[in-house]
Amino acid sequence: MRLLANVFKTLERFCADRSAVSAVEFALILPVLILMLLGSFDITRAVDAKNKSVLLSRTVTDLITQESDGVSKTELANIITASKFILYPYPDSTNVLTVNIENLVRVSETPLKYEIDWAYTSGTTPTSSSTNKQTTTLIEGESGVRTKVTYTYKMKFIGMLTKNIGLSEITLNSTITMAPRWGMAVGAAGW
């Protein structure tokens, strides 16, 4: 009987005690705080990967526009391979990174046509001479090199929780167009 009285007294004291309320509240909010921390980590890395993909497209375009005597397939592959180091510490394999380079030549003012003199996509064979209708800032007769970088960033922490609903990766796109440094179109050497 005395043992039962002690149990009730202890239980009564426990129910009246309010000193552990903050610990219980913290235990309830802790999972949300952890998700916010890991989410901000993934978002920060995604923004960094986006900045690096923009820098990659700018670097590839800049290196190609410096070529005055044309670029070969080997030079294009080497430029892309060397530029991939910009993405470090993120993966740069062909299943997450695509680099598409096009040499554009403006052929008429209306309807804003340009000709793709040559095109190269990382991991494929180069193509040449196709015509597209798109808006561009090139003046008639001028040329430019356009580089499109598509990078698939796979989230580390939040991606594990959201992969079943298709939110484990983000596709980052970057496009840049530059005029050749020497004023002449960058030709395809030995294609």
Image: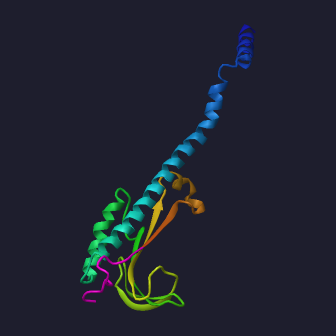
Residue furthest to the top in view is 2
In the depicted structure, whether residue 166 falls above or below residue 186: above
In the depicted structure, whether residue 4 falls above or below residue 180: above
Q: Label the magenta part by its dominant secondary structure.
A: loop
Q: Name the residue located 45 percent from the left edge and 53 percent from the top edge.
A: 45
In the depicted structure, whether residue 184 falls above or below residue 9: below
In the depicted structure, whether residue 4 falls above or below residue 126: above
Image quadrant in which the C terminus is located: bottom left
Q: Position of residue 116 (x, y in %)?
A: 41, 87
Q: Name the residue located 45 percent from the left edge and 61 percent from the top edge.
A: 50
* Quarter-of-image position of residue 105: bottom left
Magenta segment: does it hold 63?
A: no
Q: Which segment did they paint magenta?
A: 177-191
Q: Is residue 100 visible?
A: yes
Image quadrant in which the N terminus is located: top right
**Display coloring:** rainbow
Q: Position of residue 22 (x, y in %)?
A: 64, 26
Task: Count the numbered circles shown.
Answer: 0
- Front residue of 11/144: it is 144
* Quarter-of-image position of residue 78: bottom left
Q: Name the residue located 42 percent from the left edge and 67 percent from the top edge.
A: 96
Q: Position of residue 142 (x, y in %)?
A: 39, 85
- Front residue of 67/123: it is 67
* Quarter-of-image position of residue 81: bottom left
